[in-house]
Amino acid sequence: MTDRTLIDALRAADAVQFGEFELSHGGTSDYYVDKYRFETEPDCLEQIAASFAERLAAIGEDDTKLAGVALGAVPLVAVTSVETGTPYVIVRKQRKEYGTANLVEGELDDGEEVVVLEDIATTGQSAADAVEGLREAGATVNRVLVVVDRQEGAEELLAEHDVELEALVTAEELLADAE
């Protein structure tokens, strides 16, 4: 199911760029999806929140606690929380070394079901790390929803962690008929 409105919003935010780019996992690509372009554009954020809310409702997870991976997914989980009225937590990439030394920020009850929201999935390692951190904190995590899946192994890696990856948009859809 192609979300044409979301694709148009991502393109309008100039989030898709072409050239030669180094990716966070060390590889290179001839295109780049700039999460900061779409996460700082209000119309695009509004569309992402609506799309996440619609997907959560469609899969029966519309009242499941949400989690966002710091830093990139925090704006996404915040606007989706407001859109759905569902509380959320933030998962740090590493435990902070001061204060409460939390890996997961916010209220999380032992055994609570959580859906992880993520910006872009390439290898899926960031999402897998967040899932493991949430599970260590006592959460039940079976699903990751991502804005864009670059289709470079994230689905397979998350499956190894018994987690289903769902994308609002795939790279194939986003790049189809792109200039």
Image (spheres, rainbow, N blue to C red):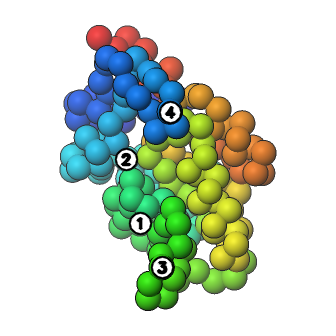
Outermost residue on the bottom side: it is 99
Mark 2 touches mark 4? (CB < 8 Å) = no
Residues at discs 1 and 4 in contact (Cβ within 8 Å) = no
Marks 2/3: CA distance? 33 Å
The tag earlier along the polypeptide, 2 or 4, is 4
Q: How many marks?
A: 4
Q: Earlier in the sequence, mark 1 or mark 3?
A: 1
Disc 2 marks a residue whose amino acid type is Ile
Percent coordinates x, y for residue 160 in the rendering: 78, 45
Kind of residue indicated by mark 4: Gly
Q: CA distance from mark 2 to mark 1?
A: 12 Å
Check disc 1 and give the amino acid type.
Ser
Q: Label 2, secondary structure: give it.
A: helix
Q: Amino acid at mark 3?
A: Glu
Q: Nearer the viewer, mark 2 or mark 4?
A: 4
Q: Residues within 10 Å of mark 3 (few under 14, many from 20)?
A: few
Q: Are marks 2 and 3 in contact (CB under 8 Å)?
A: no
Within 10 angstroms of label 2, few (less than 14), some, or many (20 or more) residues? many
Q: Is residue 19 left or right of residue 144?
A: left
Image coords of residue 129 (percent x, y):
62, 56
Residue denoted by label 2: 48
**Is 108 situated above or below 177?**
below
* Image quarter (top left, top right, bottom left or bottom right) of the C terminus: top left
Q: Residue at x 23, y 30 (%)?
A: 14
Give the mark nearest the N terminus, 4 or 3: 4
Label 1 to label 3, Cα distance in Å? 27 Å
Q: Secondary structure at mark 4?
A: loop
Q: Secondary structure at mark 1?
A: helix
Q: Nearer the viewer, residue 6 or 21?
A: 21
* Residue, disc 3: 97
Q: Which residue is mark 1?
A: 81
Which residue position holds label 4?
Answer: 26
